[in-house]
Image (cartoon, coloured by chain):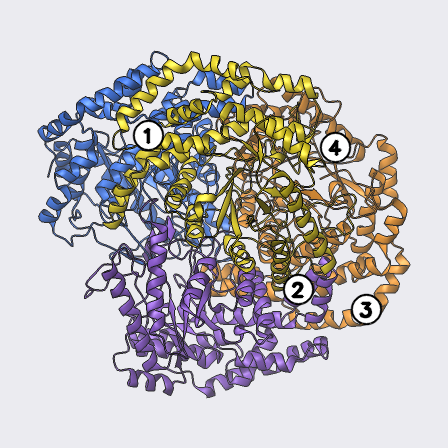
Chain colours: A purple, B orange, C blue, D yellow
């Protein structure tokens, strides 16, 4: 199903007067010191990829509760992304996970997606689960495995994923390596690291020139003593070992307690090794909650670094933005729209910071003023700006409301049934 | 020094037009659904005590950098609190720490404070440092010490502190027990606990009928293997063992990583054992940073519980609100004003939550809407309401600005010198 | 399959000379100061229950790798426990999880188990997964659910579990409540707590007089914002609300980072609310690793408290000892035998501590000597004592070796196939 | 005071028979598979530097309790190290901290130390405290400061420290940079990092060719929002930016909760950037407890990596071993001897691991056997080997006992008084 432009327009019309009032108040408050038109325009251009594996109900090792109407084919997944994009006009691409979403007929898939105005973002390999037809098991690792033949199988899989991506128009591959150990002594750390570097290099060598390789890191889960790539230091070391088109990808949930993530972002920008983001939120571990639902100020501080990075003509201008969350108890589409909104709000708030005044206060070590500048931006109600960008792009003023008013989930259940199940986590 | 009402009025006058515009926009947006007059009135009544030990430069075990103009007597400390109160009209009381602030002549001290419109909040005992004249050392504990004579000394000190408090008009004593161990086996946990309970009970027995005893908890520091009262469970168990006027005090920085503090607050309200708060913020441990500077959303979620608790005629209606922070690099008075503002903002945002709609959404397990309701309140720019309450109370629209415009710190340095040093941490 | 006594004896005979040498050296070193015969006898009596849900391959939300020869029926599970018990003579009971192990014909099941010398330990309810025939979903909670009808269903299930347990000779029910929320605002903490208390009380009222109710706590997972019973304070509060036969159960993996678990154990013993243990080990969260594989000193410190508690005629004399681990990459039976050994080693080391000298050193605050006393016990190679207890009980000197020599896993695969799958996690 | 060789010999003679029995049992158990003579010889050669700043009572921000007899001059500090070395024969060097231990007359200091058989290990700079004569304050940073003139002052100080070290025969400088921020926005992360790199490079350029620069990292304290060098990734990045003689120094207490430190050690060895260690132990943060007192298995796992690293002719053969602890409640000399013993025990246990069998088990992914091999080594009572190495070196069988029997602390108090105070933390 699609959300008709007419429906969106009709729904918007009811809310436009109130919106315009709020926007005009904001303009009056912030202009001319801040150029709101530029901010709105940046927001209009800002696109976040939706992961194909997060359109159905997620679960934990203790179980999973169905949502109903889950997409059970790649086409249906693309449709779901199109629904979100129709409403938000900010999610015009999908990120595929192989082998959960093998595009058998890539021409047809690409055409179908194009008909819904959806393109293909980073492709993702999967060597953390065994597939039925697979020769060797990944139980004890894949790219880091002690046996060359297992590593080769995992390397070949990654190269195959690149091939799929080329056919669809992707420009990057994301490698999340779940390899690691659950007990002290289980492997030799240095041997594993050398194997990993060598495997990644082989994949990197198969990368088209205009592609990026994005390397994730994560301190634990599904291995509980060590992960082969536990932190940004290891990820960027491996990326450097591959070459200039290999980068580190930051997943917000992949850090030890209390980590200062925004500082990592800044250092990666400085090293020109920041490649992209998996947005989500968490309180304990890799909780994969809705972006901004637990630590909105941290999200804002990360965007503070990104805005600075992007204004510098650095490599940070071409980052991969992606949501990576698990929808255990919310409707996945509603959840994703909440994440999109939270990301846009944080981005906008960061754009409001007066960079000159901040530099000056930092230069004078005026810590009180530094804090005031950040918190004034964060305390500003920027939602009218986000809505305005959506309106100008043809999206909805209030995506969640219209999603419910139009009974989208009910219609999806009607179409697909109550117990359809999406591949993914 | 004092901040003259005339100066405040003059400064306010310049900003009143802009403020009124913002306030009237907010009224237009939120009324009549939300009764802003009630909220403003609640804000006007909301008072936060200032700790006497946080008016000078704080430090770490690695060192301390002077601020200049620090108050070196109790009278000067009271003056500093009066300055903050002149500007914010929300800090009309001071919380003393004995023996850092022994009120030798309590009548005079009380009169002096009254002349500045300052009263006395909870008194605090200190058995984590040895005093020169002291017979027994607290190196290995005080109220939990293995030797009865040491415990007696600590009990007597606490009773002495109550006496001081009675003379000044305090109505509660806060006990922070730094006792604990730094090495496995150093003490018998159960013996320590029994000693602690028995010591607290002796102090409790000396408590006037209309007083409260507030018992803090903290998982580590200054002891690094165990603390005698590490968590809310232990604190409330000990409070129950004392009697109905003993309560748990929550210091926001006294928790293990990732603790859900707002849930603890809710459970303590349910048990009718929540006694009060030490506000601050932290990223790692007991960092004692400015309230709201790191995790403003957590502060809001805590106030969400408090607002619900206070609306229920429960014991939560009579809580002790106090800031407990350390000012290592900011001007302590500026830092405290930032904390006061952050607390008021969080309180106001929590007051904005539509309780009926939230209950209904919770009743229907509509998690998406629950989140929307909280985040809409949090995303609202409530600063005009906080300012309005300050104006009505006779305070400043913008306390930080006027503090700087009037060169308060410079004048304090002139008065007290560059190297005066406040007692405290 | 069973392990024949003759095989064990034959295998032991080869190793007996060397064992006796080690044992006699230990006796010479430690006696007469320490009464090794008493220690061996305590070890002989020490029994640890095996959970029925941990006999197959465990997994994470990212996947699961089969082991082969997994027990696919309750009888086969009992057989697996009997194998471990044949070898270790320390695991003569099984703890069932309903509905994973419904004993349809309880008389037959009980007889079969008895024929293998296996009895039934605590029964466990499960309200964290929906069963096909179930009327209401537990997606948004069970015993804490906002709707009384859902709570009733969960209460009835627990009472049903008690019935199963009565038929089998169990004397306790363990309640692990996975209820909680994943987003701020999702539920009212106080309402959930009241519902939980009331539901537990209804179950408690159905408890036979000679039974115990054991209430677990856990800070997060599978809910990622709050758990209804996050910590020992909440669990013991609820247990108190039920009655004197309700207790707290400590699962070693259910704590926030850096928690001092041994102190919790001590406090629960003091409160007479310690009911039992789920042994495992972890580095990050509820990793469910082999007991003693990551933090053996912590395990020893916990047993230090337990040994003291048990020597005091306190309620700690009748604790439920159980392993609760997940076997993602090791053979479950081998893994369990490693856990059993680690528990026995820690227990023995704790029994070696000279209690009189420790009390004296604590009395004198001689921290250096306190540490020496603990570390001397921990540094002693006590494995000969553990082996001696096993030999005297008719078990194997070296269970892991004989398990491999006899090709037990291979035989189980032959019997049950490569892809049999055990119910459980 | 010195410990006379005759006293040591006499004390040893009483314990020699029992020791020889234990040693000969161990030989019988472990030989010929393991070459104990080589292990004893490695232990004899293993030397750990004692930090000059840890010979007095340590404290926290909440206070400090005197020990009595603390060394109040550099000569007295050297004496204290000599006492430990007389007893353990494993601490023949001291690591100085400037300006706490300025060697005014370096020739005399060096001669005096030599007369006590003590040499000079790494020198340490201090730019986290202001000194009276200092022109610019380090309140807002030193090597990373926004102002070049402050950075220059800190650079000059470090170069001055190198000069002191050259005069004394040191071969390395350890830089612990306490710089950072306590509030979001306080500084620009990238600017700070560039300033830090540039400052370190200037110091590096002043380094003699045969010296090393060791760069510490630490995630928080004394700054509580960010540290300029928070983790190994940043430290090794900066070391790489300096040159091949710059290395990362690992302080065991400088990590976020749950960090896998042994993996960091392995990766640094692989990168040839591991420079040395600050040994201590901790449960929560940078607790600076006695090495091995809380997590002895972690210490063993770290030595497992080090033993592998050292056997490979890698840069790991020339590491700086140092204790860095704080002695808040124990006698510092006793505490240090406990740390030395714990380090030696862990080293010995790691040397016992059968490397060939471990490699083979790792090669076969036999996780159970991998764990058994490590835990068998860890479970072995290796103290007789450590004692034997001490005896052969002329040290004491039981340093702690003789220290007490000879009333060393009492004599130091007699010599130096009860309230002498050592410079340091």
Say yes or no: labels 3 and 1 on the same chain. Answer: no
What residue is pinned by disc 1? Answer: D36
How far separated are the C-alphas under marks 2 and 1? 62 Å
Specify the quadrant of the image occupied by residue B57: top right
- Of badges 2 and 4, the one in the foreground is 2
Q: Disc 3 and disc 4: Cα gap in Å?
A: 42 Å
Q: Nearer the viewer, mark 1 or mark 4?
A: 1
Q: Nearer the viewer, residue D319 or C111?
A: D319
**Identity of the residue drawn at 52% across and 20% down:** C362
Q: Position of residue C60 (x, y in %)?
A: 32, 54
Residue B33 falls left or right of residue B414: left
Image location of residue A126, percent across then percent down: 31, 65
* Separation of marks 1 and 4 at Cα, in angstroms: 60 Å
Residue A370: x and y, percent? Answer: 70, 62
Q: Looking at the image, is A76 positioned above or below residue D33? A: below
User: Disc 4 designates what residue?
Assistant: B98
Question: In the image shown, does A194 or C413 lie closer to the viewer?
Answer: A194
Determine whether label 3 and label 1 are within 8 Å by CB: no
* Mark 2, secondary structure of its residue: helix
What element does badge 3 sit on? Answer: helix
To which quarter of the image does residue A1 belong?
bottom left
Location of mark 2 (residue)? A374
In this rendering, position of residue B137 left or right of residue A65 = right
Which chain letter matches label 4?
A: B
Question: Image point 57% across, 20% down: which residue?
Answer: B146
Q: Which residue is mark 3?
A: B16
Neighbour tally class for label 3: few under 14, some 14-19, many 20 plus, Cα within 10 Å: some
């Amino acid at each position: 199903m699609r959300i008709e432009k007419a429906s969106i327009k009709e729904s918007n019309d009811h809310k436009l007067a109130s919106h315009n009032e709020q926007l005009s108040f904001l303009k009056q408050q912030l202009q001319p010191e801040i150029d709101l038109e530029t901010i709105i325009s940046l927001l209009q251009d800002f696109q976040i990829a939706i992961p194909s594996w997060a359109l159905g109900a997620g679960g934990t090792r203790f179980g999973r509760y169905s949502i109903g109407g889950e997409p059970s084919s790649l086409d249906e997944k693309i449709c779901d992304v199109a629904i979100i994009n129709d409403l938000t006009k900010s999610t015009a691409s999908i990120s595929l996970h192989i082998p959960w979403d093998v595009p058998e007929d890539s021409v047809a898939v690409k055409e179908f997606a194009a008909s819904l105005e959806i393109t293909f973002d980073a492709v993702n390999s999967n060597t953390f689960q065994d597939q039925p037809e697979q020769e060797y098991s990944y139980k004890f690792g894949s790219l880091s495995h002690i046996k060359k033949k297992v590593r080769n199988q995992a390397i070949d899989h990654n190269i195959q994923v690149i091939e799929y991506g080329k056919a669809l128009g992707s420009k990057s591959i994301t490698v999340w390596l779940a390899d690691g150990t659950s007990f002290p002594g289980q492997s030799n750390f240095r041997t594993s690291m050398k194997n990993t570097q060598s495997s990644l290099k082989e994949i990197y060598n198969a990368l088209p020139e205009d592609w990026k390789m994005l390397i994730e890191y994560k301190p634990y889960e599904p291995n509980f003593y060590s992960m082969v790539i536990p932190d940004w230091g290891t990820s960027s070391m491996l990326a450097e070992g591959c070459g200039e088109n290999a980068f580190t990808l930051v997943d917000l949930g992949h850090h030890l307690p209390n980590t200062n993530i925004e500082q990592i972002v800044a250092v990666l920008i400085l090293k020109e090794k920041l490649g992209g983001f998996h947005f989500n939120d968490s309180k304990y571990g890799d909780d994969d909650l809705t972006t901004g639902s637990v630590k909105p100020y941290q999200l804002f501080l990360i965007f503070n670094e990104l805005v600075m990075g992007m204004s510098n003509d650095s490599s940070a201008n071409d980052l991969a933005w992606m949501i990576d969350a698990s929808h255990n108890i919310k409707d996945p589409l509603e959840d994703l729209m909440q994440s999109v909104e939270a990301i846009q709000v944080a981005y906008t708030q960061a754009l409001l910071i007066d960079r000159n005044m901040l530099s000056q206060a930092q230069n004078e070590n005026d810590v009180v003023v530094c804090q005031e500048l950040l918190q004034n931006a964060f305390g500003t109600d920027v939602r009218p700006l986000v809505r305005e960008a959506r309106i100008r792009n043809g999206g909805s003023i209030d995506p969640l409301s219209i999603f419910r008013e139009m009974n989208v989930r009910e219609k999806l259940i009607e179409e697909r049934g109550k117990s359809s199940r999406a591949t993914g986590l």
